[in-house]
Image: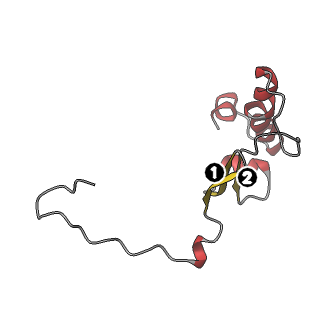
Amino acid sequence: MLVAYRMDWRTDSWLEDALRLVTQRAADALGVELYGLGVPGASADLVLVHAETLAEAVVARPPRALVMARGQVITDARHQADHPPAAPRPSTSAPGRASAR
């Protein structure tokens, strides 16, 4: 996170503060009233990552496990390990020519 990097914030507490600065505090500064977890009427935009602490989520930058926008699931990778990725499809283009896809 650029804020923490630029300010040389390295402790868990400072990293948590940096995350709040770019989320809740930014919403407060912009006057966004319906923002935050547990706020009735908020748009339910969130990103779920696997991390033990907020600081770990900032520093480790784990892959997004779940992404929701306005309450709708956009990406759900929580069970990808249970389902291996599909095999790549064979190319349908002629040799030496790029596919039009």
Residue occupying image coordinates x 81% and y 39%: 42
Could you give the CA–CA distance between mark 2 and mark 1, rounded to whole angstroms? 8 Å
Q: Nearer the viewer, residue 8 or 36?
A: 36
With 95 as the anchor, is 53 left or right in this view?
A: right
Circle 2/circle 1 CB separation < 8 Å: no
Q: Nearer the viewer, residue 80 or 39?
A: 39
Measured from the top left, where is residue 29 in percent x and y?
Answer: 79, 21
Measured from the top left, where is residue 77 in percent x and y?
Answer: 61, 64
Which SS class for mark 2?
helix
Q: Say which quarter of the image contains residue 48.
A: bottom right
Residue occupying image coordinates x 80% and y 45%: 12
Three-letter residue code for mark 1 = Arg
Position of residue 3 relative to residue 84, above or below, is: above
Residue bearing mark 1: 61
With 46 as the anchor, is 94 left or right in this view?
A: left
Q: Which numbered disc covers residue 56?
A: 2
